[in-house]
Image (cartoon, rainbow, N blue to C red):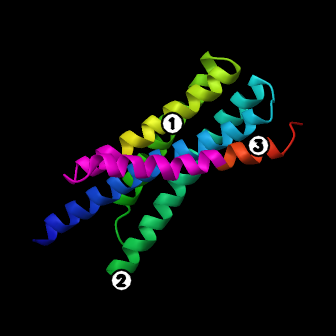
Amino acid sequence: MNEKNQIKKRDKSILIRNFVFGVEDSLVSTAGLLSGIAATGVPRETILLTGFVLVAVEAFSMAVGSFLSEESAEEYMEGGAVSSAASVKGGMVMFGSYIVAGMIPLLPYVFLLGQKAFATSIALSLIALFLLGAVNENAKKRGVMRRGLRTVFIGGAAILIGVMVGSLVPGI
């Protein structure tokens, strides 16, 4: 493989990594936090405020973290300064995927009330996690069901932690 193709493959790898990481982290973090907050019995407005603040702040934080870590890794691999173009694109993909995926667990609280919002948020997040794992595995032409279920199990565990902590700590 020539150097130009290696660079293209590396750049594509950065984008895929940031997309998968952004979607997975946003789904798990947002669903876990919202479920934990909702489990305390706080008002819907508190859940929505918490969710929108989380998604906005974390999307930016993850994008910056992606940019800095990708750039650092590239500089390490190349032994010096490199173009930041791929790192910037990776950060933008991280930001966008985090925002969009964060809306999946958050929007049920906009349109539904109480237990319906809680259950729908978790269900949609688990479905999205399954699809993320399945699509990722389908791209490699391997066991779609196994990877989808693995992604649901891992993400579901984080959501469960949020619910457990929220259930243990009384609402303020």
> Is 156 a magenta residue?
yes
Residue 60 visible within the image: no
Q: At x 68% / y 46%, what residue is drawn? A: 162
Helix, strand or loop under label 3: helix
User: In which quadrant will I find the C terminus?
Assistant: top right
Decide which of tag 1 and tag 3 comes sooner along the chain.
1
Residue type, mark 3 in image: Gly
Using a 10 Å C-alpha cutoff, classify the residue at mark 3 as few (fewer than 14 neighbours), some (14 to 19) or many (20 or more): many
Residue 108 visible within the image: yes
User: In which quadrant will I find the N terminus?
Assistant: bottom left
Residue type, mark 2 in image: Gly
Residue range highlighted in magenta? 133-160
Using a 10 Å C-alpha cutoff, classify the residue at mark 2 as few (fewer than 14 neighbours), some (14 to 19) or many (20 or more): few
Q: Name the residue under label 1.
A: 125
Residue type, mark 1 in image: Ser
- The tag on residue 94 is none
Decide which of tag 3 and tag 2 comes sooner along the chain.
2
> Is 32 a magenta residue?
no
Q: Mark 3 points at which residue?
A: 166
Decide which of tag 1 and tag 2 comes sooner along the chain.
2
| 68 shown above or below 19 | below
Front residue of 151/105: it is 151
Decide whether the magenta segment is chiefly helix, strand or loop. helix
Q: Mark 2 points at which residue?
A: 79
Helix, strand or loop under label 1: helix
Task: Compute the Cα span from label 1 to label 2.
Answer: 41 Å
Helix, strand or loop under label 2: loop
Furthest toward the bottom, the residue is 79
For marks 1 and 2, give the one nearer the viewer.
1
